[in-house]
């Protein structure tokens, strides 16, 4: 009586599963909330641009 070996979770298989999970989460988030508009987002670094930060607790007077 021989039994078939159980499927092993090898390192490449675990990596592919992790990438698939991340891609699924990103796709779900994009479908649910829509893609961001790059022309409406604030600049990541606004040093000397004249753009004042707003909406954060550290910008309160």
Image (spheres, helix red, strand yellow):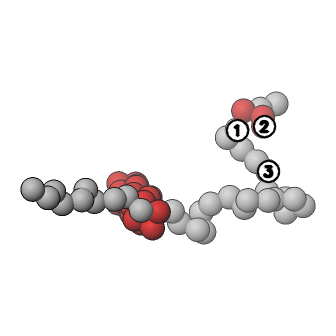
Q: Secondary structure at mark 3?
A: loop
Q: Which mark is residue 29?
A: none
- Residue shown at 67% from the left, 40% from the top: 55
Q: CA distance from mark 1 to mark 2?
A: 6 Å
The quarter of the picture where residue 13 lies is: bottom left
Left or right: 16 in relation to 47: left
- Residue shown at 25% from the left, 56% from the top: 6
Q: Position of residue 36 (x, y in %)?
A: 51, 62
Viewer can see residue 41: yes
The quarter of the picture where residue 32 lies is: bottom left
In this view, which residue lies farthest toward the right? 48
Marks 1 and 3: CB-CB under 8 Å? Answer: no
Q: CA distance from mark 1 to mark 3?
A: 11 Å
Identify residue for label 2.
Answer: 59
The quarter of the picture where residue 59 lies is: top right
Marks 1 and 2: CB-CB under 8 Å? Answer: yes
Q: Position of residue 26 (x, y in %)?
A: 43, 59
Q: Position of residue 3 (x, y in %)?
A: 16, 57
In the image shown, does 59 or 28 lie closer to the viewer?
28
Q: Which mark is residue 56?
A: 1
Marks 3 and 2: CB-CB under 8 Å? Answer: yes
- Residue shown at 18% from the left, 60% from the top: 4
Q: Position of residue 1 (x, y in %)?
A: 9, 56
Quadrant of the frame with the C terminus:
top right
Q: Secondary structure at mark 1?
A: loop
Q: Which mark is residue 52?
A: 3
Q: Secondary structure at mark 2?
A: helix
Q: Is residue 12 above or below residue 58?
A: below
Viewer can see residue 30: no
Mark 3 / mark 2, whichever is N-terminal: 3
| Disc 3 packing (10 Å; few <14; some 14–19; many ≥20) | few
In the image shown, does 59 or 45 lie closer to the viewer?
45
């Amino acid at each position: 009586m021989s039994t078939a070996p159980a499927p092993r979770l090898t390192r490449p298989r675990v990596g592919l599963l992790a990438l698939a999970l991340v891609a699924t989460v990103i796709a779900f988030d994009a479908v649910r909330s829509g893609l961001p508009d790059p022309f409406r987002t604030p600049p990541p670094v606004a040093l000397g641009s004249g753009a004042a930060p707003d909406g954060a607790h550290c910008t309160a007077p």
